[in-house]
Amino acid sequence: MLTLYFSPGSCSQASLIALEESGLAFEAKKVNFADGEQRSEAFLKHNPKGRVPALLTEQGVITETPAILAYIAAIAPAARLAPLDNPFEFARLQSFNNYICSTVHVNHAHRPRGSRWADDAAALEAMKAKVPQTMSESFALIEDRMFAGPWVMGETYSVADPYLFVMTSWLPSDGVDPAKFPKAAAHHARMLERPAVQRALAREKA
């Protein structure tokens, strides 16, 4: 059985939602960041990066959200979570998810995780001050050029949707009003109506 290591409210939420959508049997194990559990010897055996998500499979461990989302879609083809039969469309989905991973998530991380890049207090404050701008610029690009609607890829729901959902949910804490981006805000509301999303959020609160 698959086992997903996750932390509530983190990017691992996207993988948790995707698993709920997939119909696959899985176990979800919560990693308590407040207690530093991600740095424990037991967890580092699974993911030496000390981060979530980490997906344990019969073949080994997969880390990094885009990889996990693509893997879930590939092993649950009946759920139609990715255009697996269309190389171009699948690459377009991967392009979106990798933009979220490499740019949007990194923009966000400069607020709560600035110590990854600097130790100087002034530098940390400068990074935090920049986050509303960088997140807004990223979401403007998503809103205007990357989001097809009503789902990320168009008419068909995919594993890109839970990833965008997570990023949109972070906007208020990053000093950005989601209402500035009506397509993303409507998408977030649409996601909240999905039973799989509701189940994933319930797991996080349990």
Image (tube, rainbow, N blue to C red):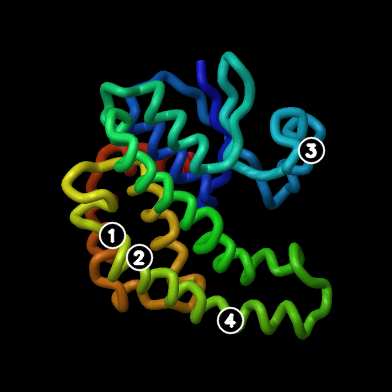
Q: Please, what secondary structure does the residue beneath circle 4 have?
A: helix
Please identify, in this view, whether the residue under mark 1 or under mark 3 is nearer the observer.
1
Q: Report the residue marked by disc 2.
A: 142
Please identify, in this view, whether the residue under mark 4 or under mark 1 is nearer the observer.
1
Q: Is residue 32 placed above or below 71 in the rendered structure?
A: below
- Residue 52 placed where, x, y %? 61, 42
Please identify, in this view, whether the residue under mark 3 or under mark 4 is nearer the observer.
4
Q: Please, what secondary structure does the residue beneath circle 2 have?
A: helix
Q: State how far apart marks 2 and 4 are (Cα).
A: 19 Å
| Of pointers 4 and 1, the one earlier in the residue sequence | 4
The label number, if any, that marks residue 26 in the structure image? none
Please identify, in this view, whether the residue under mark 2 or under mark 4 is nearer the observer.
2
Label 1 sits on what residue type?
Phe
Q: Which of 87/183 is in front? A: 87
| Of pointers 2 and 3, the one earlier in the residue sequence | 3
Query: Quick check: 121 left or right of 136?
Result: right
Q: State how far apart marks 2 and 1 are (Cα).
A: 6 Å
Q: Are marks 1 and 3 in contact (CB under 8 Å)?
A: no
- Residue 124 placed where, x, y %? 73, 77
Q: Residue drawn at (55%, 66%), measured in percent from left and top?
A: 108
Q: State how far apart marks 2 and 3 are (Cα).
A: 37 Å
Q: Report the residue marked by disc 4.
A: 130
- Residue 174 placed where, x, y %? 51, 73
Q: Residue drawn at (46%, 64%), measured in percent from left and top?
A: 170
| Of pointers 1 and 3, the one earlier in the residue sequence | 3
Q: Are marks 2 and 1 in contact (CB under 8 Å)?
A: yes
| Of pointers 3 and 4, the one earlier in the residue sequence | 3
The label number, if any, that marks residue 147 in the structure image? 1
Label 3 sits on what residue type?
Ser
Q: Residue drawn at (35%, 48%), measured in percent from left and top?
A: 92
Q: Report the residue marked by disc 3.
A: 40
